[in-house]
Amino acid sequence: MFKFFLKFNVFVLNLVTIFSFIINNSVYAVTTKGKGKGILGEEKEFNIAYLPTTKKYILRDTVRNIETRSDNFKTIEEQLEDIEFDAKLRWDPNYSEIIKDSVEKSIVNSATPYFEDSIAVDAHTNMAIVYDYYKNMFGRDSYDNKGSEIIQYVHYGKQCKEGLFNGMAFRFGDGDGKDIKPRASLLAVVGHEFTHAVIFCTAYLSNEGMPGALHESLCDCMGALISKKWVIGDDNELIRSLFDPTINGHPDHMSKYIENGNTHVNCGIHNKAIFLLSEGGNHYGVTVKGIGREKTAKIIYHAITKYLKENSTFHDMREPAISSAKDLNFTEEEIKSIEDAYTAVGIY
Ligand SMILES: [Zn+2]
């Protein structure tokens, strides 16, 4: 019992040490400006920090609390092995030193303020744009609105075309090195994943069925609004089109909803409604007058943070969208646009 207590104490102590290391990292790191090129070759400037302890510059934005790390192409299985290994190590008296060392090594670093890792540069700058969008548009500080550290990993998996948020950190695959771009280099994808994290801390929408399709759609819509393009992907790889989901063979009306279908496919119906709400258009004989991107974004955010719940469906989004517009003092004409947009895709 005593032995266990002792071990437990060491464990807690280790956690405290790790925590203070992270705090120290932010307090004693010197904020400065870094430079580097994104994968398209464009020169970018961004916030970095200098760690006097290691004499290295690191991809840490102390203003926005964003840290960009490298996953070193590890797959989920390899990470699980790491966690297992890590769990065994916890009882090692040198555990905190070992962990400190591995965290320190995984932060993307450079001997000079110039960073050569173009994917990491894209991730660092894109996450800053997403952070600023949420801060300036909605006053939200980080995904949890508590200013929590945004930890993101690049070089995730092997030939991986996924981006994800696991409740603690963001992970972005590098694509296939040809047509499929690194996920972190696509601003809409970073915006999409960040919105998953916002929803995780607010509406907590399910990932399955129609609530899952609504969840994916809201992430797509925010990603599109942040990147100012109504597509997720690029010319080489169109992941989803919000202005015309049928380009990818996805449904654009409730009459085409696929029962038990993929949430990343069925989301097309709600994506189309939001596209129409923002930009206007005629769809299945219903004319919608667009209200613009900013107001569209405000309705989505308000609905996510105030009205939506775990099992909200497309149908449960129509009224919250209207209620959000009323809360935000939108005009009668703008509220009619919301009704028309949902009617156009058959969501009542
Ligand atoms: Zn998603």
Image (spheres, rainbow, N blue to C red):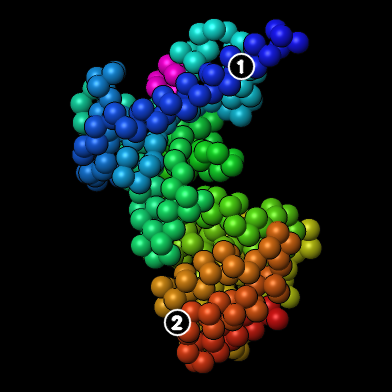
Residue placed under numbered mark 2 in the picture = 291
What span is colored magenta in the figure? 100-106
User: Element under label 1?
Assistant: helix
Circle 1: is it few (<14), some (14-19), or many (20+) Cα within 10 Å? few
**Residue 249 picture location, percent across and down:** 63, 63
In the picture as drawn, the residue positioned furthest to the bottom comes out as: 332
* In the rendered image, the vertical position of residue 4 relative to residue 199, given as above or below: above
In the rendered view, does 142 fall on the left or right side of 43? Answer: right
> Which quarter of the rendering shows the N terminus?
top right
Q: How far apart in space, not on screen, are marks 1 and 2 (Cα)? A: 58 Å
**Residue 167 picture location, percent across and down:** 59, 42
As for residue 102 lying within the magenta part, the answer is yes
Q: Nearer the viewer, residue 327 or 270?
A: 327
Q: Amino acid at mark 1?
A: Asn
**Can residue 106 be seen at all in this image of the molecule?**
no
Q: Amino acid at mark 2?
A: Ile
**Residue 76 picture location, percent across and down:** 61, 29
* In the rendered image, the vertical position of residue 131 relative to residue 7, given as above or below: below
**Residue 329 picture location, percent across and down:** 48, 84
Sequence order check, earlier mark of 1 and 2: 1
Q: Name the chief secondary structure element in magenta.
A: helix
- Residue at 70% across, 7% down: 3
**Can residue 145 be seen at all in this image of the molecule?**
yes
Residue placed under numbered mark 1 in the picture = 9
User: Element under label 2?
Assistant: loop
